[in-house]
Image: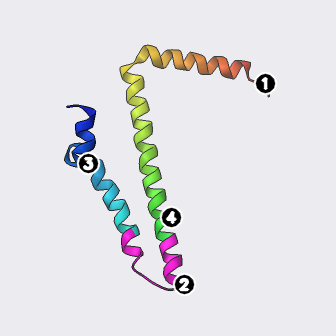
Amino acid sequence: MADGDLRDNPAARGPREGRDAEGMAGVAGATGTTGATGDAEDAQESDAARRRRRAQFLRELHEAKQLRDRVQPRRARAARMRQQMRMRTFRW
């Protein structure tokens, strides 16, 4: 399947769509209120939803990096060596 097919076909994207919709459902549900207290609740809910989405993204990113290191051990070792050289030559 080509990359263009994934972009055009939302069903081919997989389970991530459900998480995004779930995360945005709380934001959409909170926007129905009006008034000053409603705005504060909207901001709190959107902040909480943003933090949940960010935490989920960071977990997935960390998992993807670990997977890449496992499947490409030579590249991972080279990256570790470069990082060590950077730390050795870093001046405090």
Q: Do the residues labelled 3 and 1 touch (CB within 8 Å)?
A: no
Which disc is residue 47 wearing? 4
Q: Mark 2 is on which residue type? A: Ala
Magenta region: 28-43
The residue depicted at 53 percent of the width and 19 percent of the height is 79
Residue matched to label 3 = 15
Q: Measuring 32% from the left and 54% from the top, which residue is drawn there?
A: 19
Q: Earlier in the sequence, mark 3 or mark 4?
A: 3
Labels 2 and 3: the sequence-earlier one: 3
Position above or below: 39 against 71? below
Q: What element carries label 2?
A: helix
Residue identifier under label 1: 91
Percent of width and height locating residue 30: 41, 75
The amino acid on which the numbered mark 1 sits, given as a three-letter code, is: Arg
Asked which secondary structure carries label 1, the reply is loop
State the scheme by which the image is colored: rainbow
- Which residue, given by chain and number where applicable, does mark 2 sit on? 36
Q: In which quarter of the image is residue 13?
A: top left
